[in-house]
Amino acid sequence: MGETFLITLLASVIAFACIPVLLTVFSDFTPPGLHFNPFHQYSTFVFLSVIIVLVSFFSGIYPALILSGYKPVAVLKSNVLLANQRQHTWIRHSLIVSQFVIAQFFIIVTIMVSKQINYSINSDLGFNTEAIITFNTPRDTVASHKQQLLNDINTVPGVELAASGFLSPADKGVAFTTIESPSKPDVKANIQIRWGDANYLKVYKLKLLAGRNIASSGNGNEFLINNKYAKLLGYTNPEDALGASLKFNGQTMPIVGVMQDFHDQSTKVTISPLVFFGGNEGSTFHIRLKSGEAGGSSWSRSISAIENAFKQTYPEETFQYAFFDETIASMYETEMRTARLLKWATSLSIFISCLGLLGLVIFTINSRIKEIGIRKILGASVSQIVAVLSKDFIRLVLIAFLIAAPLAWWVSSKWLQDYAYRTPMNWWVFALSGASMVVLALVTLSIQSIKAAMANPVKSLKTE
C-alpha cells in the first residue's frame, strides 16, 4: 500500500504541474477567464488529497491482500506464487479487454463524428461555397449608395461577380414568412425567404430546374421557388409551377422559375420550402472572387480594394467580411469541438491500453521464460515463438472489438439521428478500428516478444 501511495503521489504532483499547460491546450472548451490559482482555492488541495487516498487504496488493496496472503514456507518450497498468479489470469485479461473496448469504442465514434462533419461541410449543398465573401452595409442608407458601391466592386480586377441582397442561401439565421397560394389555399407552411438582384443566383451558382432567373430590373414583382415548395404546392413536374401566382404582403406575383433544392440551414434539419424574389433593398453584399487567383496575396489585394470602395461610400463604418465556406463551417462548431475532444480521449485511451497490454506481456513472458527457452532448444524459430506469445493477446483485442463494435454502432446511430441528412455507417469504419488496434497490439507485443524469443535459452534454464 505504501508503494502504491508513493506512485500515486508522484503521478498527482506531475498532473498538478501539467494543469496550466492543459488549460491552455483546451482553452476552446473552457469558460473564458478560467485560471488555475490553487493557492487561493484550498478546496483544490482537499480534492487532490482525497483522490490520492482513494486511488491508492483501490489500486493497492487487491495486490496487497494477494501478496500478504501467501504462506512463506509454501512459497519457498515450490512455485506456489506463480501458480497463484496464474489463477488470477482472468482478472488481468478482463482489464485488458476493458481497456481495448474503451479504445476501440472511441476510435469508431471519433471516425463517425469526423465523417459526419466532413459530409456536412463538403457534400453537395446545392450551391457554391468557394471564393465567396459576404459583408453588410448600414441598413438606413440611400439605395443609390449601395448601387454605386456594387458598381465599384464589380470593377475590381479580382472580383468575378458581385450581388446585393438578403441572407446567403444557407445561414445561421433563418427568415420565415407567410405566403399564400390562391390556387392552393389549403397549403399552410413556414416558407423561408431570400431576395437579391439578378446576380445573386449566379454568385452562388444556384441551379434552375425550370423557367428563368428574375428580371435584372429587380423590381421585386417575380418569384422563384425551390423544388421542395413546388412539390408542396402539388407540382410534381417543376415546369407545371411556372405561371402560378403567390400572394405576399397583399401583392400577387407570378412564379417565373423553379430552383433546385439547396440546404438553407445546417444538415440537422430538412430543406425548407423557399421563395426568392428580386430586390436590391438588402444590406448584404455577396461577392465571388476569381478562383484562378486563389491565394493569400491575390485575394488580399482584391479584398483590400473592396474595403477601399466600402470606405469611400461609408467612411464612418467598419468593414467586416467573412468567407462563405467559413460561415458554413461555423454551423458545426459544437460538432468540431466534440470531434477534437474525442480525438484527445481516443489517443489517451489507446496509450493506456497499450501500456496495460505491455505490462501483461512482460508479466506473461517472465512467467513463461523457461518455456520459451525449451522451445528454442527444440528448434522453434523467433517468429514461431513470437506467434505463440502473441496469439492469446490478439484474441483479447478481437474480443474487445466484438464488444465495442455494437456499442459504438448504437451510440453513433443515436447521435446521427440529430441530422436529417447524415453520412452512412460504412463497414470500413469498423474494419479500420479493428485493424488499427490489432496493428498497435502487435507493435506493443513485439517490443518484448522478439526480445524474449532472441534471448539465450541457457540463461533461463541454467537453474533447472
Image: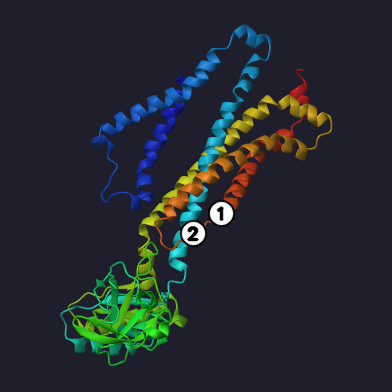
Mark closest to the chain's N terminus, 2 or 1: 2
Residue farthest right in this picture:
379
Residue 367's label in the rendered image is none
Residue drawn at x 19%, y 87% as measured from the top left: 143
Q: Are marks 2 and 1 in contact (CB under 8 Å)?
A: yes
- C-alpha distance separating marks 2 and 1: 10 Å
Q: Nearer the viewer, residue 363 or 316?
A: 363
Q: Quadrant of residue 172?
A: bottom left
Q: Which residue in the protein does label 1 denote?
A: 429
Residue drawn at x 43%, y 71% as measured from the top left: 125
Q: Quadrant of residue 233?
A: bottom left
Q: Which colour style is shown?
A: rainbow
Q: Which residue in the protein does label 2 denote?
A: 115
Residue farthest top in this picture:
73
Task: Let me know if residue 374 appears in the view.
Answer: yes
Type of the residue with mark 2: Lys
* Horizontal arrangement in the rendering, residue 118 relative to residue 377 (left or right): left
Badge 1: few (under 14), some or many (20 or more) residues near its Cα, within 10 Å?
some
Q: Label 2's element? A: helix
Q: Position of residue 333 (x, y in %)?
A: 36, 59
Q: Position of residue 2 (x, y in %)?
A: 45, 19
Residue drawn at x 25%, y 77% as measured from the top left: 179
- Quadrant of the snapshot with the C terminus: top right
* Horizontal arrangement in the rendering, residue 395 relative to residue 149 (left or right): right
Type of the residue with mark 1: Val
Q: Nearer the viewer, residue 279 or 410?
A: 410
Q: Label 1's element? A: helix
